[in-house]
Amino acid sequence: MVRRDITDLCGVMEAVMETKPAAHILNVGNTVTVSVKEWVAMCYACFGKEPSFVNVSKGIGQRNYFSFYDYDYELAVQKMQAVYPNTIPFEEGLKECAAVRSCFLQMFMA
């Protein structure tokens, strides 16, 4: 079985070794940015489930309810795309990773 959850990382490493680009310290990831809510929904969907989201009223401070600061985080992958442009689609990689984890848990937790 091919480990799709690390295929992009291995592909980038191979491309760097073969092409020897000047910029060889690269972030590895997808160009598609998803929100935390979208990411959670995709994770749940991998297991055939749908999450339930609870909205907090604006009167409650965000940090009083959720411990992380409210900011966007986007991985800069332009340098990676220059040497390895054909990454696995985010949702596909997530589904395959979840399938591998499910098989592992079934084998060792049963």
Image (cartoon, helix red, strand yellow):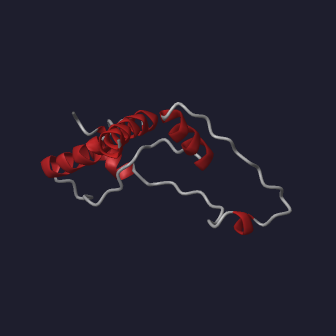
Q: Residue 72, percent across and down?
A: 59, 57
Q: Quadrant of residue 50?
A: top right
Write the residue at 59% across / 49% down: 36
Residue nearer the viewer, 95 or 108: 108
- Left or right: 92 with respect to 10? right
Q: Residue 19, percent across and down?
A: 16, 48
* On screen, residue 62 above or below 82: below
- Left or right: 77 with respect to 64? left
Q: Residue 38, percent across and down?
A: 59, 41
Write the residue at 54% across / 57% down: 73
Q: Quadrant of residue 102?
A: top left
Residue at the far front: name it: 110
* On screen, residue 78 above or below 94: below
Write the residue at 35% across / 51% down: 28
- Left or right: 70 with respect to 16? right
For the C terminus, the image quarter is top left
Residue nearer the viewer, 31 or 52: 52
Q: How many marks?
A: 0
Residue at the far top: name it: 48
Q: Residue 18, percent across and down?
A: 13, 47
Residue at the far left: name it: 18
* On screen, residue 25 above or below 5: below
Residue nearer the viewer, 13 or 51: 51
For the N terminus, the image quarter is top left
